[in-house]
Amino acid sequence: MSPSSSAGCSARVASMSSTLSRSSFDRSHDVMTPVTRRPEALLRLFFGTGVSVVELAEQQLAIRGAGWQFVLRQASRGLGHAVRALAGAGATRAELADQLLEHDGPAALARLYYHLDEWRSSGVLGAVAVGASGALATLAPLPVPDASGPLQTGEPAPDIAYVLSPFACLRRVDDELMVESSTTGARILVHDPRARLLCMTLISAHTRDALPHAACGLSSEEADALCALLHHARILVQAHPTAHSQDAHDEPLARWQFHDLLFHTRSRMGRHVGGYGGTFRGAAPVQPAPALKAPMSATAVDLYRPAIDRLCADDTPFTRVLEARRSRREYGATPITEQELGAFLYRVARVRTTAADRPYPSGGASYELELYLSVASCGRLAAGLYHYHAGEHRLHFLSPMTPDVRALLEDAARALGRQDPPHVLITIAARFPRVFWKYESMGYALILQNVGALYQTMYLVATAMGLAPCALGGGNPDVFARASGLGRLTEASVGEFALGSSPRHGPAGE
């Protein structure tokens, strides 16, 4: 939820909480307490901002959101009133039922409850838990309905222990607490400090009846309403006797780690937060980072440039290269040469005509990736750390073999299962502002996709040249930051690729 959408949500919540009838509270107590213990009595339901109700024909209504709609056929007068209330100030389940009873009679209630459960489970119906002092928390509607019904209807049972899901995430948004779940995409904004305190107690398992609501300053009814909201969003889950929670016992879900699932759901369309794709969220007043970095050193090494026209005519056939591609972790007795390294970089990453035209693809032609070479053994090239300038096709010398550069090579050796380091370790770094200036929600995912495209280009070129290539599964960005002197949040390592001469001489397949 962006700051602007958070502010809009808070304004609407204030309006909704003020419309909740005070007649449902017992004024004989110092803290006004609802007469009923049904949590739904304190939940005010509503459609999200921008949802409208359109009359298509007589007794036919369409509930329309951004890119979706529900069509109600044979919609009674009472159902029409209920739907319009949900698209307006919102209403409790009881208030909606009263409207249907007034206009249509008891027989119409079953259909109302069916649609309410349908809309709530698909996520398009939000809810505000309203207590004696105002809004406690708001469950934001999902931007797009989910036909799989990720949210659950019903209320938590009073005698079953519940606990926060291990996939729940609590963070600050403006001056309020956001509780969200990567399993459903649901987000709850907790407004009341007492409700925030109760959320903290749910780190350990409690039954509804055993919740320390009084210690938090809430009535039992208010605590029930908050728990119902958390349960509906699958943020509050049943505690399992042999696991921390039911989520952890769920076999498919148990294979996921928290950060993996959150990254997956938030960087894909549907359950993202805010805008998605090329929204140019950082366009004003900041200018984009340049497509090419300025030279990082005055000491540079000119690299060999192969004859591309000759390679186009005589190089190893593509399918032969593709079929021969392997990760190779053993090297020849003679290290890779300067000429081979120059030819490799030229064929993989040089600027061809403009800065946005290179041999490997890049999402949005951003070309945010930079190549840093930790050289252990490469002909007459001095050992140390270099930056490859794609526009100049030169290596700029950054440092000799410092302890941090050596640590990069040693980490690569361990990843390769070798005692000795690779001849050359290529660390792929990303200039984050170059991507984040334009892309929202999926910027980092796009960077990793670009790394994958670059990996395959490196593999194929190295295979065609008869070299030994191997992409590594991970690297240490902190060590790279120390070795390079770059800021961790401005430009950091996102991939590593080991390269060396092959024990087998000649092009692929020979």
Image: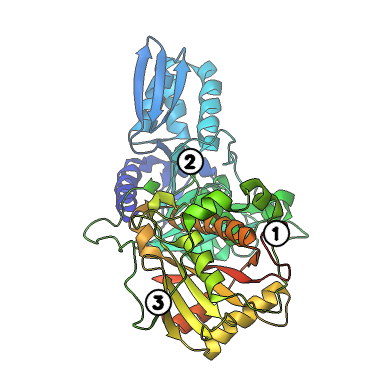
* Horizontal side, residue 243 vs residue 304: left or right: right
Q: Residue at 37%, 58% (x, y): give it.
A: 436
Kind of element beneath mark 2: helix
The relative height of residue 105 versus residue 485 in the rendered view (above or below) is above
Residue named by callout 3 = 487
- Is residue 214 visible in this depiction of the protein? no
Residue at 60 percent of width and 82 percent of height:
377
User: CA–CA distance between discs 3 and 1?
Assistant: 34 Å
The amino acid on which the numbered mark 1 sits, given as a three-letter code, is Arg
Residue type, mark 3 in image: Gly
Q: Earlier in the sequence, mark 3 or mark 2?
A: 2
* Mark 3 or 2, closer to the camera: 3
Q: Is residue 497 above or below residue 120?
A: below
Question: Which residue position holds label 1?
Answer: 326
Label 3 – label 2 distance at C-alpha: 52 Å
Numbered badge on residue 41: 2
Task: Tell me which corner region of the image, top left, top right, bottom left or bottom right, holds residue 50.
Answer: top left
Q: Residue at x 55, y 80 (%)?
A: 375
Residue 31 lies, in percent from the top left, at 41, 57
What kind of residue is marked 2? Ala
Judging depth in this view, the residue of 75 and 92 nearest the camera is 75
Marked residue nearer the N-terminal end (3 or 1):
1
